[in-house]
Amino acid sequence: MLYTNEFITFEHENEHDLEHTLAHKKDFSVPKIYNANGNLAKRWYVYFSFRDPKTGRLKRMKNIYGAANSHKNKEDRLALLTRYRRRVLKLLQEGYNPYIDNTEFHKNRLAKKSEIPAPVEQPKIVPVDKPLPTEVKIEAPQPLKQKQKEKVADKMTIREAFDFSLELKAKVINERSLQDYSYSTNAVVKWLKENKPKIKTIDQFTKKVALEFLNSVLLKTSSRNRNNYRLNLSSLMQTLEDNEIIDSNPIRKIPVLKSTPTRNKTYTTQQQENIFSYLEKEDPILLLYIKFISYNLLRPVEVCRLKIKDFDLKNNTIQFKAKNSPLKTKLIPKILLKELPDLSKLNPENFLFTPIKIGGAWDASENNRRDHFSKRFKTVVKKHFKLDENHALYSFRHTFITKLYRALLENSSPHAAKSELMGITGHASMDALEKYLRDIDAELPNDYSDLL
């Protein structure tokens, strides 16, 4: 019996334009090349899927390596895999089926090449539980353990699969999310190495195994952290399913656990005033950073993104990438404008905030810049005032939005106050703003003693 790899790697006929595929539902996916993002240290191959006659769904077949990985440069390796890909597509279009005995199919192809008529017989279906292998190696008998190692090597390892998914995710998610995803995959790989060393390939990472890992996270940390791991891994596994690396996403069926989210507390008026007075002497840069959060109602990460070129001081506006918009324009209130130094002589490409001065170069990731000011606030302010863990930089945004809303309520209805506030805070919808106000307890009822 002859299998896919033999057809592909030893086919030497002239290659010409491929026949058009039939208009009905395809029994196979178009073969693709996996090039490990150009990494020659990893195995490159051609892969495709074929419709399982039992389930009716496309199922990933074994990878086709041939002699591609013996080449030590990208051009030769890719050229050979391109030929393999064209050949396997031609075979599939001519009727090759990995679930049946293809001996007669091969005889007919040889007969056509030698122009010797050959009787056309229907292929004999072999009743097998699993698809016939699509790759064989003709070599001397080997010990069973060695054969098992080669069989495992034909499949994508867990690390390779996660790296493949992360590479695709990098094009559609931000740097912070990608870092979180990467951290989650590193934790899984480490846990498997310590607790499930026999699990090597991504198809072995089942729902049961994933649940064991998530349970270990739950026991060590919290349900919220466990749910975050579940969310990150499920997103990565879904990408693998969408690209037919795995049959289905095993984490999708794992339920989310109930968790109580933590909330940053608002500061009292006295706390806020004391902090501002203290920072005027101790850390003016940190104070201005906090005032952008307080007066302009920016999120800490949004303040870290500000560059000199983002300021339009003729119109008193700034532009920045916000949580709900790729480019947001906001008015700079006068209370903040008078705090700004002269920006006209600074390099437009410099960040507004750096560790040592206003307006300078800072070679650090967005996440690291934000973490710097978070740690700086903890060291300079929280320790001095003995604040608890729920008081953070983000708390200043809660504090001043609460102040604004309650001030607006004094001369207008709740709906009118919220409508004006939405334009200031930048919330995308009234529902989002109302939920936010409820979460921070900005809305308090009037005194109801007379009703009692």
Image (tube, helix red, strand yellow):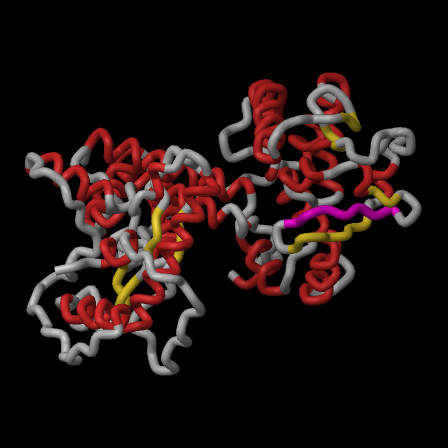
Image-based side of 405 in relation to 137, left or right: right
Residue 72: give x, y in percent of width and height.
Answer: 41, 34
Q: Is residue 382 magenta?
A: no
The front one of 80 and 285 is 80
Residue 320 covered by magenta stretch: yes
Q: Quadrant where the N terminus lies?
A: bottom left
Q: Quadrant of residue 32?
A: bottom left
Seen at 88% across and 35% down, the residue is 338
- Please indicate whether residue 409 sits to the left or right of residue 332 in the image: left
Expressed as whole percent of the image width and height from the top left, the position of residue 165 reads 41, 48
Residue lying at 58% horizontally and 64% vertically, measured from the top left? 431
Q: Is residue 175 above or below residue 363?
A: below
- As drawn, is 27 to the left or to the right of 408? left
Residue at (82%, 45%) from the top-left corner?
332
The answer to whether any part of residue 260 appears in the image is no
- Image coords of residue 144 (percent x, y): 6, 38
Q: Give residue 4's position: percent from left, percent from top.
A: 24, 58
Between residue 109 and residue 144, name the one nearer to us: 109
Residue sticking out furthest to the bottom: 24
Where are the magenta residues, as a range?
316-322
Tell me what residue is drawn at x 74 percent, y 58 percent. Answer: 423
- Residue 332's place in the image compared with 452, above or below, is above
Q: Nearer the viewer, residue 19 or 244?
A: 19
